[in-house]
Amino acid sequence: MELHSDETIWYFFKKGETNAFSILFKKYYPQLHVYGLKLSNNQEITEDCLQNFFIQLFEEREKETTIKNLKAYLFVSFKRRLIKQLQKNQNNLPISEAQLFKNNFTFSAEEISIHQEIQFLCTSTLAHLINNLSPRQKEVLYLKYYSGMSSADIAEVMDMNYQSVLNVLQKALIKLRKSSENQQIKNILKKS
Amino acid sequence: MDNKNKFDLNYFLTDASFENWARGINKNDITYWNNWIQNNPDYVETVENAKAIINGINFNQDYPSKEKVNEVLLSILPEIRLDSVSNKKPAYKKKSHTTLLTAAAAVLLVLISWTSYSYYTNDSQTVHKTNYGEIIDLKLPDGTSVVLNGNSEISYDKETPRLLHLKGEAYFKVKPIPSTNAKFWVITNDLKVEVLGTHFHVNTRKQKTNVVLDEGSIHLEFINGEVTKMIPGEMVSFSKESKKIIHKRVDIKTPYALWRGGTYAFNEIPLEDVMLNLELTYGLEVQYSSNELKKIPISGGIPNQNLKICIAAIEKATGTRIINKGNILRVLENPIY
């Protein structure tokens, strides 16, 4: 049960209420923490960056005037900050996002549970299949099913249009389905 | 040609009843979509993909614990307090501050809940749709209330929440905006209703549109370009096919808008017309054992939210027997009468 809607929290946050800061922090720190870890694979950088992000958000609260969607806004601005930090750590070499995040969004078997349609796969196989998708596909899957974002929010975070989000989702899931079918056939052949 | 684009991935993903089907949670929705797929085999692939997107992947979320979050919060609070005015205030003052936040938050929440319908939809288009036999009350972003009857649909663009498209049947209580005189429009296949602030009822079933005005005044613009003004208590029917405009006085207290409360009220209406309402609200087919039966007049109120009770009431009112088999209602003479 949510006591405060994002609009309410943000309204008082902007007014400088430290209570609103705490509420916002408790609500979004966990989600952004995991998102940052998945992006960077680095706990120290993620945590430092995230703390500074919240402090800066509060200090500069008056600058942000029109925020339609708080969750998407937080994800996208935290991501930007994290990228900057990671680039700094690489001695400011202009590294592309794609290069930087080559190995991001890796999932372990424990993080995945299997629902009926793909019952025949074990979680470690499914994790392996997901980890082999493109970084973009993995991030969209993560935002959709781990963070529970709407496709419109994802479009904002990933700087894509709504239709492309659907296309990426569709392609990723078709690919998963195909490779899980292949995997299943392999398993059967191994046994016989 | 339009149809081909209509049933795209997004069409299914934004349909609440489709989502129920994909998750296998609502019996009505499951039946409806299973039938739909059988009748539209061309879309099987899109349907499969939409279903995969809805079901997705189950992640076991592993978020940092509450304790850890609080720990971090406590460590950074002093830093932001330096920046905040409330920093050096004594403890009791801070407390009254908190109460203020809660009280003001409550007021704000109420306001927000009025406008939340279109707030989080994925697209610029907001659609509200009802299943067979389902009646819903809606509040539009501008404060207008709508009662949407079963098997009906209204849609509007976020940018223009006072311009609606209607399929099926609905009752509107338009909220006037005196400061700007903002108008309100309802568009159907046959006509456009233009409103300032009023209560009226629109029904687009039976290949025509009926508009009944309860209160206020409205303009109608028909698809053939003709324009007419309506007065309270009047019903206007129009259909693209017949191009005939019919004005009729109706008793607004009884027959027309009563389904809002869950009852259809009829005044000497032939059984055939009454059953047509059921066909459209519940998606059934009606057959008669003789043509005589179609003409039996019905007066009185018939509950419309439960098909069984509804059929029992009609049987009683007409002295017939109605057998419900599959999706077909057979009306027979009752030997007892």
Image: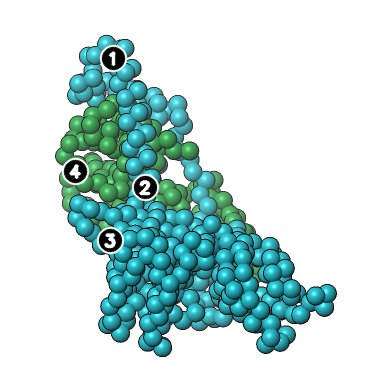
Kindly indicate the quadrant of the structure image that contains residue A86.
Answer: top left
The residue depicted at 40 percent of the width and 29 percent of the height is B69
Q: Nearer the viewer, mark 1 or mark 4?
A: 1
In space, the residues marked 2 and 3 are separated at their CA atoms by 20 Å
Quadrant holding the N terminus of chain B: bottom left
Question: Which of disc 2 and disc 1 is earlier in sequence?
Answer: 1
Q: Which residue is mark 3?
A: B196
Kindly indicate the quadrant of the structure image that contains residue B159.
Answer: bottom left
Question: Which of disc 3 and disc 2 is earlier in sequence?
Answer: 2
Reply above or below: A122 against B113. Answer: below
The residue depicted at 27 percent of the width and 20 percent of the height is B78
The residue depicted at 29 percent of the width and 55 percent of the height is B176
Hey, which residue is sitting farthest right in the picture?
B336
Q: Do the dots labelled 1 and 2 sit on one chain? A: yes
Judge the density around disc 1: few (<14), some (14-19), many (≥20) Cα neighbours within 10 Å: few
Q: Which residue is mark 1?
A: B93
Q: Nearer the viewer, mark 1 or mark 3?
A: 3
Reply above or below: B196 against B96. Answer: below
Reply above or below: B53 against B115. Answer: below
The circle drawn on residue A100 is none
Chain ID of residue with mark 4: A
Q: Nearer the viewer, mark 1 or mark 2?
A: 2
Chain (green): A
For badge 2, the amino acid type reads Trp
Q: Nearer the viewer, mark 4 or mark 3?
A: 3
Q: Do the dots labelled 2 and 3 sit on one chain? A: yes
Chain ID of residue with mark 3: B
Q: Chain B is shown in which shade? A: cyan
Residue B303 visible in the snapshot? yes
Reply above or below: A14 against A100. Answer: above
Residue B237 at what x, y percent from top left? 41, 78
